[in-house]
């Protein structure tokens, strides 16, 4: 499966939250004898390489603290989990998708649509949202193109309800208000240069492993309960699609999602 998760942080709280994450990462890296780099959550939590010198319970506690800090003080989680098999079936079903066969672009544009839907409903919004991604040299230009060109195919994911002639209807989007809550260029950064990008990667791993354990055996006793506990921390702050018109984009993502993921 492919899981993409984003963490939204208010600009006024960004410096404080970044400093808090930096401090936690510095503390855990102080116990790692190697050169500091990207956290790589899977290797970290499983004690791969030199991480096996950090006690397992301490590693588990650290990941829990990261999840708690992520959603503290208004932090919001945006994400999607796509099944590769279901994705391929959905591609072949004729939903007229605009992203070829790229699950990365499909995921990134879905997350962007969630952000648009959330922020367009915020009264007195203080500014546009900036998308900062873990560097993907092959796809970043395509994501920026997607946000700039604003294909009408995605309209149904963030369409507004309104009233016409006394009836509640879905209002058509116009070119000028498509993805108008997001700066139309996405920015890439190396994950080891940003604690926030590493945190987003950690949240993606938490969700991925949680979903894997629905059909796989535990690697150790209590693993399923551990990841369920982490997801229980995150889920109340995860934004979902909610009510949408019956459009091809909605049908595609409903078909392509992992069966354990609520969009």
Image: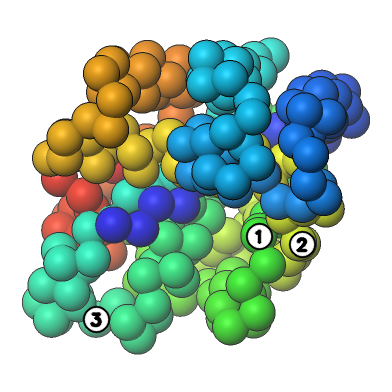
- One can see residue 88 in this view: yes
Choose mark 1 or mark 3, whichever is in front.
Answer: 1
Front residue of 165 and 238: 238
Q: Earlier in the sequence, mark 2 or mark 1?
A: 1
Q: Quadrant of the N terminus?
A: bottom left
Instruction: Give the quarter of the image for residue 147.
Output: bottom right
CB of mark 2 within 8 Å of CB of mark 3?
Answer: no
The one of 21 and 16 positioned closer to us in this rendering:
21
Marks 2/1 in contact by CB < 8 Å: the verdict is yes
Give the CA distance from mark 2 to mark 1: 6 Å
The residue indicated by pointer 3 is 96
225 relative position to 205: left or right = left
Q: Give the crowd class for mark 2: few <14, some 14-19, many >=20 residues within 10 Å.
A: few
Q: Secondary structure at mark 3?
A: loop
Residue 229's place in the image compared with 235, above or below, is above
In the depicted structure, whether residue 28 falls above or below residue 39: above
What residue is at 16 percent from the left and 35 percent from the top?
A: 217
- In the image, is 160 to the left or to the right of 194? left
Q: Earlier in the sequence, mark 1 or mark 3?
A: 3
- Distance from disc 2 to disc 3, alpha carbons, whole Å, reads 31 Å
User: Which of the marked residues, 2 or 3, is nearer the chain's N terminus?
Assistant: 3
Residue 210 position in % (x across, y down): 30, 33
Q: CA distance from mark 1 to mark 3?
A: 28 Å
* Disc number lying in front (2 or 3): 2
Which class describes the residues within 10 Å of circle 1: few (<14), some (14-19), or many (20+)? some
Question: In which image quadrant can residue 54 be found?
Answer: top right
Question: Measured from the top left, where is residue 200 in percent x and y?
Answer: 59, 42
Apparent side of residue 115 relative to residue 14 in the rendered image (left or right): left
Q: Residue at x 22, y 58 (%)?
A: 83
Q: Residue 189 shows which numbered tag?
A: 2
SS at mark 1?
Answer: strand
- Which numbered tag is attached to residue 134? 1
């Amino acid at each position: 499966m492919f899981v993409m998760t984003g963490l939204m942080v208010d600009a006024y709280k960004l410096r404080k939250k970044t400093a808090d994450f930096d401090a936690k990462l510095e503390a855990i890296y102080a116990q790692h004898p190697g050169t500091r780099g990207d956290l790589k959550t899977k290797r970290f939590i499983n004690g791969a390489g030199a991480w096996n010198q950090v006690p397992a319970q301490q590693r588990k506690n650290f990941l829990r603290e990261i999840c708690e800090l992520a959603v503290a003080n208004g932090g919001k989680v945006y994400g999607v989990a796509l099944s590769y098999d279901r994705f391929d079936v959905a591609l072949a079903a004729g939903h007229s998708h605009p992203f070829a066969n790229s699950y990365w672009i499909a995921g990134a544009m879905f997350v962007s649509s969630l952000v648009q839907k959330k922020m367009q409903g915020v009264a007195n919004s203080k500014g546009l949202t900036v998308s900062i991604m873990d560097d993907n040299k092959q796809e970043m230009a395509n994501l920026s193109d997607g946000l700039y060109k604003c294909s009408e195919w995605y309209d149904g994911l963030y369409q507004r309800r309104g009233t016409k002639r006394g009836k509640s209807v879905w209002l058509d989007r116009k070119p000028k208000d498509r993805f108008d809550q997001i700066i139309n260029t996405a920015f890439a950064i190396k994950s080891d240069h940003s604690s926030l990008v590493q945190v987003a990667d950690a949240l993606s791993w938490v969700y991925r492993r949680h979903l894997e354990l629905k059909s796989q055996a535990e690697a150790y006793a209590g693993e399923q309960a551990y990841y369920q506990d982490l997801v229980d921390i995150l889920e109340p702050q995860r934004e979902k699609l909610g009510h949408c018109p019956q459009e091809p984009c909605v049908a595609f993502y409903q078909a392509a999602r992992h069966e354990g993921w609520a969009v």
